[in-house]
Amino acid sequence: MKILSLYWGLYSGAALYIDGKTVSATLEERFTRKKKDDAFPLNSIEFCLKQANIKPNELDGVASASLERDYFSQLTRQALWGIEDYLKQQKEYWFPLFYKNKKNDYEKIFDYRADRSQHPKDYWSVPGDQSQSFSKDVERLISETLGIDAEKVHRIEHHRAHAYYSYYASSFRNENILSFTIDGHGDGLNATIGLFNSNGTYKRIYKTNQCNIARIYRYTTLLLGMMPNEHEYKVMGLAPYGKEELSKKALDLFKNTLFVDGIDFKWKIKPDDSYFWFKERLEGVRFDSIAYSLQEWVEKLTCEWVRNSVRKFGVDKIVISGGVAMNVKAMGKIAELPEVKDLFVGGSSGDESMAISSGICLAEDLTLERGEKWNAPKLIPFSNLFLGPCAGLESEKQVVEDLDKAKYQILENPLPEQLASLLVDGKVIARCSGPMEFGQRALGNRSILADPVNIEIKDRINAMIKNRDFWMPFAPVILDTYAERYLINPKKIQSPVMTIAFKTTVEGFKAMISACHPADKTARPQILKEKDNPELYAILQAFEKLTDRGALLNTSFNLHGHPIVNTPEEGVSVLQKSGLDGLVLENYLILKCE
């Protein structure tokens, strides 16, 4: 069975499923070089089909994530918004609606943002009532783009796709698994609980639209002067610098809104909106106290919800998906719960992940329609996420040939020992090799690597390329043989894709100090198994032989504000524009001459 699946929204993307395996997946931003690109994923679709040498008419079906689509969000291309646009939305649309009972014309407010040249041009440029029909038009737009029968295109319900993502990314099979989804909004819901039985059959057992955690987190991010739908991780990183004794006002405010009653989300005081109501009441509170209180409230809520659910349904192995699952600190607290025996959180599990999981949902649906048995246990996990484009030798040869040899030293087929030696010497080396990672986290193939024992390396990387906020930590990639020594993880919970924050041991913090959070000494690790990335594993092993340490600093290979690099050409461009010391390609090592 061959199924193309796509997500069209912030971080648009596509994936291809063939006979029980997700064989490719990528995001549109990697090709257009527009961060968070929400354009129709034409390039992603083309990559997936070309990679497998499949024509659209050979597909058994096409899955499109979400039943409902917001015409105005797509028309105004929210991926391209800045903070001022979000403030304008609050002041000119939401404030009049909530506080004056006046509904202003959204399209008129953002006419300067309307993109009528996007694909398909004839749809957006022709006047009509698309605001009412856009959700229903999606199948037709996809089928016309691919040149296939519209009956082959199927929409998949939002939270079902979320639930399937972390379950099928995990190695959990042949046992009951409790699934949680929690996000800002999708098809009328923002949190669900479901059960995958031992055969992999999914049944939803709880749903709600009252869990406004993600929406409040989003607009508190805006309140703090940062970008909604992008910089929530910065608020999470800022939170540990806050002090409990200075945060009572803010913490009491959050606690007196949403709370958990059993497995239900309920309100003590329901805010009139998610921005102005909090802005008025948090005036005068320190920025770090707001971040601390928000994060503390989220951790307490999610932990109580999971704890009560595990007790109620009697299943202690769980998976979590949705935008809130990107909050690695909350996931770390859930992992520590005595009620939770095991946990898996899929990589980059926001809405972009549905580009993958909606295809699995459709595969199940089509299998059952044919009167066949759905064999979930045989589906291959995709936990390592190396599903994207892979640079070829010819393109690497071309970029190397074009380099100024007076400025760069070029070595062919570098050995892991050579790379490890450079890292030990304090060099900061980028890697653009092998298939690209899917999602928002670099996992070694499009990464910047450095020795994490030197605290000054963090400032060097920020100065040379990343320009991250001073309070934000980097993350480590850790050999699986060192995980117990470096992380406090008695349940041996798997974290191959940087989705859970763990407390570090004394040895671990010392060995990875520049890749840990300095305030609370946690780490968001990529725990690496050799089978997931043998080449990166070999570099770590060579580094371990030289240092007796089993971890490297790993951060995404990109210029600040730009998507992760895709091609060797982009990798060399970033090398030339930054203070990086060198670049590893599949077949070459490029070093700047000193």
Image (cartoon, grey):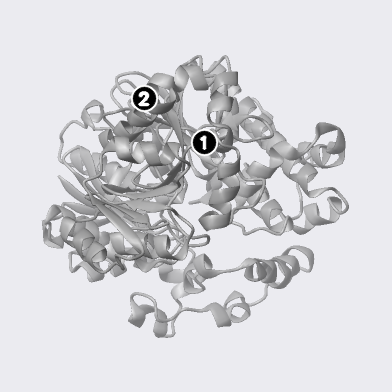
Image point (39%, 85%), residue name:
126
Residue type at mark 2?
A: Lys
Image point (58%, 26%), residue name:
510
Q: Secondary structure at mark 1?
A: loop
Quadrant of the image occupied by residue 527: top left
| Closest to the observer, 381 or 395 | 395
Q: CA distance from mark 2 to mark 1?
A: 15 Å
Circle 1 Cα neighbour tier, 10 Å, few/some/many (<14 / 14–19 / ≥20): many
Image point (31%, 64%), residue name:
569
| Closest to the observer, 594 or 180 | 594
Residue 133 higher or lower than 464, as above or below:
below
Whole-percent x, y for residue 446 in the image: 37, 49
Which quadrant is home to the C terminus? bottom left
Whole-percent x, y for residue 27 in the image: 36, 56
Residue under numbered circle 2: 545
Numbered disc total: 2
Q: Is residue 157 visible?
A: no
The answer to whether 413 appears left or right of 319 in the picture is: left
The answer to whether 358 appears left or right of 301 in the picture is: left
Whole-percent x, y for residue 79 in the image: 50, 65
